[in-house]
Image: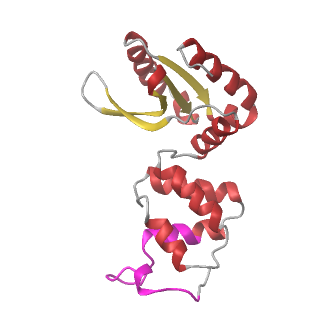
Amino acid sequence: MHRTVTLTDRDVLAVGQPRRTLPARSIVDAAQWASGDQEARAIIAAAFQQRLVAADDLHQVVNRLPRAHRRQLILATAADAAGGSHSLAELDFLGLIRRAGLPEPTRQKVRHDSAGRRRYLDACFEQWGVHIEIDGGQHLDPRAWWADMRRQNALWVDGDRLLRFPAWAIRAKPDEIITQLRAALQAAGWPG
């Protein structure tokens, strides 16, 4: 249980009982109370992935809390999550490419599959036709794996390149990730 002494009417849901905070305030509080920075980042990314908050929601809450714990981390993570990094591995990947001086990709790029359904690419270097998918454990299920292969094959048929990385490799093998990504971008015409 946590208590706060800073709670404005703008942070409280006006209907229903018991009284409770709005999602943006709840997420900021959870990020402050998290056991570590990685947990705080994961909470924020999940909130954006589930569409519980929009781009400016967390910023407004943090502005009302001048002594917010992890203030800069919350704001930076919210900006990256609003830009499309919706998991901890996707946030870590974005940090990797920034540190490596690679161009910043479009994140959560919308594509339509052969049935017209909306699909999202985790990262897309559109100018060079290089796409990145970061796979968590759920991608090991045979049906999910087959769906991934079909999407990968469709991209290949269209002439694009797709690199797939397991989430654990983003943290455990960052040099290999950057080496492969740099090679794919250069093979596709990136001058870097």
Q: Furthest-bottom residue in view?
A: 5
Residue 39 in percent (x, y) is at: 65, 57
Q: Furthest-front residue in view?
A: 191
| Residue 25: in magenta span | yes
**Range shown magenta:** 5-29
**Could you tell me which quadrant the N terminus lies in?**
bottom right
Compared to residue 59, the image places residue 183 above or below, namely above
Instruction: Give the residue drawn at x 63%, y 75%.
Output: 68
**Quarter-wise, where is residue 21 in the image?**
bottom left
Compared to residue 126, the image places residue 138 above or below, namely below
Residue 123 in percent (x, y) is at: 50, 33
**Quarter-wise, where is residue 65 in the image?**
bottom right
Q: Furthest-left residue in view?
A: 116
**Quarter-wise, where is residue 23 in the image?**
bottom left
| Residue 20: in magenta span | yes
**Front-most of residues 85 and 113:** 85
Instruction: Give the residue drawn at x 54%, y 50%.
Output: 80
**Front-most of residues 192 and 170:** 192
- Secondary structure of the magenta portion, mostly? loop
Residue 72 in percent (x, y) is at: 64, 64
Residue 49 in percent (x, y) is at: 45, 50
Instruction: Give the residue drawn at x 54%, y 72%.
Output: 62
Compared to residue 153, the image places residue 94 above or below, namely below
**Could you tell me which quadrant the C terminus lies in?**
top right
